[in-house]
Image: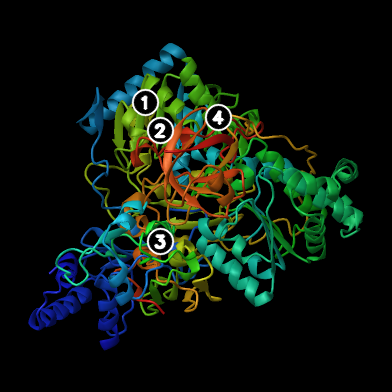
Amino acid sequence: MSEEDWKGNIDSRKMSRRRFIKGTTAAGVALTLVGIDPNSGTFKAAFAKGASKPEKWFLSVCPYCGVGCGVEVGVASGKVVAVKGMKDHPVNKGRLCILGKNLVDILYTNDRALYPMTRRGERFNRIGWNEATDRVANQLKQTIDRYGPNSVAMYISASEYNEEYYIYNKFVKGCLGTNNLESSARLCWASGVVGLVKAFGADAPPCAYDDVEKADLFFMTGYNVYSSKPVFFRRIIKAKYRNNTKLIVVDPRNTNTADFADRHLRIKPGTDVILHNTLANILIQEKLINEREARQLTENYDAFKQHVKKFTAAMASEATGLSVTEIVETARDIGRAKAGLFLWGQGLNQSNIGTRKVTSLLNIVFITGNIGKPGAGPMAITGQTGAMGLREVGGLPHLLPGFRKVTDDKARDEIAKIWGVDPNRMDSANGKTLPAILEGIDKGQIKALWIIHSNPAATFPDSNWVRKVLSKTEFLVVQDCYHPTETSKYAHLILPGAQWSEKAGILTNSERGLNLVEQAVMPPGEAKPDLEIVMDVAKKMGFSQQFPYNNTEEIFEEYKRCCQGRPCDISGITYNRLRIDKGIQWPVPALDHQGTKRRFLDKKFPKGKLRLNLHEHQEAAEVPDKNYPILLMTGLVFGQYHSRTRTSKVPALNRAVSEAFAEINPSDARKYRLWDGEMVKVSSKRGTVTVRAKVTDSVMAGTVFLPYHFAYLAGKDKAINSLTNRAFDEFSQQPEYKACAVKIERT
Amino acid sequence: MFEFIQNLFKTTFSIHLRPPGARDESGLLAACIKCGRCMEVCPYQSIFLAPYSQWSLYGTPLIDPLKKPCYLCMKCPEVCPTGALKPVTKEKAGMGIAGIIETTCLSYQETICNLCYRHCPLKGKAITLDEDLSPVIINEGCVGCGVCFYICPTQPRSISLKTGRK
């Protein structure tokens, strides 16, 4: 008897006593079978429905955010049946958030890509692997012969493993001879990373998650960490309650995180640079910092002091909409804190002045001396699992493995030697970033694009334009574990890739901790681990010599050689060691080295001293005007992840947020005569969406918030990114998702 | 065991709520003229009229929180012609009361979920979080709209819902 039948029985109130007792017994038996212990009534683990007990457990890492929680994957008869938090993992200690708890559901869905497919018109026809890889190899070869290597580009996801990045990198930069290897980290943390590089002189997340317990101030700006990194947030809140740590949240929205704040600065969207510079000015003027120490740490303290002089509290109050007392008290809190942890998120990054916002925050960190000591520093937790590894391996158009730059002749020689390729084959100029690649397709410079596990048709701003560009591409290969996605519809060729727990590799989390992900099951159908597909194509293009690997461990051993003597030295790490030392943090130069929890404890920075970047505020690329009077911000909601290719398959998550909505302030709702729950049309110069109005004072008057998860698969007029603006940060090329002008109409 | 079965019943069988601001059961049955305006105006299509099989309630508005809960937009009391639904504020909707079943609630089992807290239409007034980020119902504040009951990700639900005015 199914659960539905039961409901029907009670509804019609026709249940006899006999059937009632029968039903109860059946329920007891059924629940025991699905893994609930009726004696205690607790879930033993998140067992899949009707599955048997796991026979074997594999080590793995949750594939969602950049925190990198350790999970164990339970397998029974070749299928993943259970997932549980790893009790002895230093990051999560057995805890998971609800996304990680429901991981089993993402594997066995109806829309997995099972075999290679080619498109004819609107239809996709099944082909064999041999034919598929032949076609990719021939097309790439022909395109390169005719238009040169820079007419080819690869766009990868930042949720993959270090070994995969390494193979993609070697294939594209070493074999094809172009640096057009771009990743979805561009949409996520590009400004944050460029900010770190500008300030430290090298990409360097200096902190560890353990600093949370040592800090006595959390300064979070543009960061809804309760919704985006729940496991990490629990740690913050526990530390806050235990140590009485002060929590300051800067956010224009009244987010879930802001509910816990001791002080919530509800700043006017986009004015962060002014706030940061003013805080720095007050800190200097009220002598809350040690000037001598600041001069020692930084190379241009006096110029900075002069620069921030004009940012007075009164002026900032007018610009940011905060009161003078709020600003001054915040500065005093920062000044008094012995160890302050500074966290930021997409609120700063996804802006046309994202890098400026990040560096101006880092200025505060540096002048207050919150660097190189436990419990202090800038904490950058990425949105995708593999984003840290991506930067180490250099899966970006300007990098080579081991944080080397492609423009550096010596670096290219070193890497070419390890790769076994001709250094003259390698391109010495930076490759194209994602905006440039798409524009290149539009202008006809890029002829072939290979997309791996990414969904730009849903995630890139102005998605109507992106769809037009993708349909114009001469040769588009989409390698994904799901089909259809918004992007795979435009593919000429679909290659079925494997996903989490179907392939092996190493993931680096946002505190530089390395974790092993074991292959638990075989990919479904004819799907293959992604690096095997790329290697197959490479071999068909005549590069068999460069790809002699039998397993991922051999790839890792070669990658380790690239990191020797570099900041990310991982010579002391092997696959076997990672089975015991989970989450060990680089640099690990030797086998007996215990890893480096915090960097720069000796205050020796990559360039000797830290740099204070002097920046001015700048308006968003598109500001509300007469026709489009409302400012649109996009962001995430808890329970969904990016373009929902995974989370839309989890029924437990989709009950909470099943459709796109627009958060509208009550005063705006009155102005446009909107009622909570009504459908409302939100349109910008580029597109229109029809979503449900959610009247709430969690957004400011004159602003509206939409969750970015929804795209064309959710409905024709539900693609949130068809509204957003194609404006980019000048340094990082990260798109501005947090500001564009829209208008609201009743439907 | 007995407690578990009891909880199971509470969470698996559908219970029916009255729309927000409804009078007590006898008052509602006396005042409701079964016009269906509340059903028509509901933007979420949460309200349905009791079918003939529920003969004593036939035609009166009901909400099934297993299918679609009430999001407390408070549109229906405004259109009620007879005052069977009284125009009240969200906080006085008085539809019932929710309770958390701690033995199955994920937040009490080392998982960070809190979906009920995040999506509560009376955010912070009906459900709070304790120091472990586990949800706790505030009996005085909860109006029993059923949103937490609807979205609870466990199977069976870890929220119980009692109908009727406090």
Specify the amino acid type for callout 4. Answer: Arg
Residue A385 visible (yes or no): no
Tag of residue A476: 1
Q: Which chain letter goes with mark 1?
A: A
Q: Nearer the viewer, residue B49 or A182?
A: B49
> Could you tell which of marks 2 and 1 lies nearer the N-terminus?
2
Q: CA distance from mark 2 to mark 3?
A: 53 Å
Residue under label 2, please give it.
A451
Find numbered disc 3 in the image and state the secondary structure of the residue it sits on: helix
> Could you tell which of marks 1 and 4 lies nearer the N-terminus?
1
Q: Which chain letter goes with mark 3?
A: B
Residue A489 placement, left or right of A26: right
| Residues tagged by mark 4 and mark 2 found on one chain of the structure | yes
Q: Quadrant of residue A246?
A: bottom right
Residue under label 4, please give it.
A726
Q: Are marks 3 and 4 in contact (CB under 8 Å)?
A: no
| Residues tagged by mark 2 and mark 3 found on one chain of the structure | no
Mark 4, Cα crowd under 10 Å, few <14 / some 14-19 / many 20+, is many
